[in-house]
Amino acid sequence: MAPEPAAPQPPDDAPEDAPEDYVGLGAEEAERRARARGWPSVRRLEPDAIITMEYVVGRLNLAVEGDRVVRCWAG
């Protein structure tokens, strides 16, 4: 049987750049920063979007209203 591939891992964000610190940034800047910090997957959502609640390692979720991030969480 073939070995399973390694699951993507979230980056080791410095404490000063935790997911909550993306709140208030422009959507483009937040996504650019997240990718530069090593998040393999960045998902933009409307604040009240209906989404599934599965946890995906290595994904950063950005709830964006207008052009600003209003909530951010890993998974």
Image (cartoon, rainbow, N blue to C red):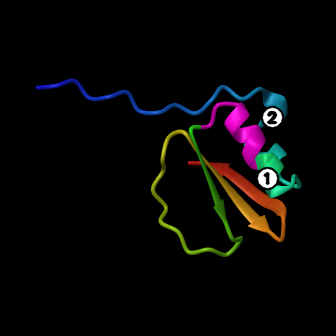
Q: Give coordinates of residue 19: x percent, y percent.
A: 74, 43
Marker count (numbered): 2
Measured in 3D between alpha carbons, the distance from the residue under mark 2 to the one under mark 1, in whole angstroms, is 16 Å
Residue at the farthest right position: 24
Relative to 39, residue 75 above or below: below
- Where disc 1 sits, the SS reads helix
Q: Kindly identify the amino acid type of the residue bearing the numbered disc 2.
A: Asp
Q: Give coordinates of residue 35: x percent, y percent.
A: 68, 38
Disc number lying in front (2 or 1)? 1
Main SS of residues in magenta: helix
Residue 17 image label:
2
Q: Name the image quarter holding residue 65.
A: bottom right
Residue at the farthest left position: 1
Q: Is residue 9 left or right of residue 63?
A: left
Q: Give coordinates of residue 66: x percent, y percent.
A: 83, 71
Instruction: Tell me the magenta residue range.
Output: 31-39
Query: Which residue lies under the disc numbered 1?
Result: 28
48 or 32: nearer the viewer? 32
Which residue is depicted at the point 32% across and 28% down? 5
Residue 61 image label:
none
30 or 71: nearer the viewer? 30
Determine if the magenta segment contains residue 13.
no
Q: Is residue 44 left or right of residue 68?
A: left
- Circle 2 crowding by C-alpha within 10 Å: few under 14, some 14–19, many from 20: few
User: Which quarter of the image is occupied by the N terminus?
Assistant: top left
Mark sitting earlier along the chain (2/1): 2
- Where disc 2 sits, the SS reads helix
